[in-house]
Image (spheres, helix red, strand yellow):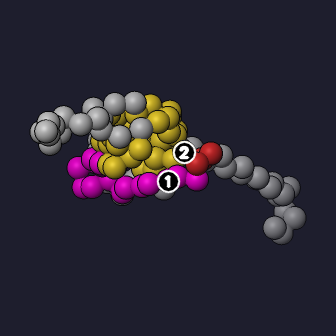
Amino acid sequence: MLVAPRGIAAQTTALVRGVVVDAQGGVLPGADVRVTKAQAGFERNAITAADGRFVIGNLPLGAYSLPVELAGFNTYARAVELYTSVPVHVTIVLEPRTFAVRVKRYFWPPGTGR
């Protein structure tokens, strides 16, 4: 009888690990990182640690979407393909959200009492 040593058998799961940073390279703790496969109704998530790092494991092999959200930053999304058990490492750069502000100025002629 042949017995394969642990770890030799074909792996059917993978993991994604990475770091979330801002445009200057500063780490961003508290970002919500999700791995989703919409057509299968599958989703897993992690919140980045104080060093901006995250790990999402035990993912069935396949293609996924990787959206990342953090207040004050634009939502980030990319595709990730997990076809081997080799961990995939990603560096995610979030851009600050810009806000448009419209300012109206009112001018009254001098002496109108306003």
Going by the image, does 41 lie left or right of 49? right
Residue 82 in the image, given as x and y percentages of width and height: 40, 33
Q: Mark 1 near mark 2, Cβ–Cβ under 8 Å?
A: yes
Q: Is residue 30 above or below residue 99?
A: below
Marks 1 and 2, how far apart at CA: 6 Å
Q: Main secondary structure of the magenta part?
A: strand
Magenta region, residue range = 41-56
* Nearer to me, 20 or 100: 20
**Disc 1 target residue:** 43
Residue pictured at 34% horizontal, 49% vertical: 58
Instruction: Inspect the magenta stretch and tell me whether residue 72 lies in it.
Output: no
* Residue type at tag 1: Glu
* Residue type at tag 2: Lys
Specify whether residue 38 is in view.
yes
Image quarter of residue 22:
top left
Going by the image, does 78 lie left or right of 93? right
Residue pictured at 40% horizontal, 30% vertical: 83
Residue 109 in the image, given as x and y percentages of width and height: 85, 55
Crowding near pointer 2: few (<14 within 10 Å), some, many (20+)? some
**Disc 2 target residue:** 37
Instruction: Name the quarter where the C terminus is drawn.
Output: bottom right
Q: Is residue 98 above or below residue 84?
A: below
Residue 79 in the image, given as x and y percentages of width and height: 50, 33
Q: Label 2's element?
A: strand
* Nearer to me, 111 or 13: 13
Residue pictured at 49% horizontal, 53% vertical: 43
* Nearer to me, 73 or 53: 53
Residue pictured at 83% horizontal, 69% vertical: 113
Image quarter of residue 80:
top left
Instruction: Inspect the magenta stretch and tell me whether residue 44 lies in it.
Output: yes
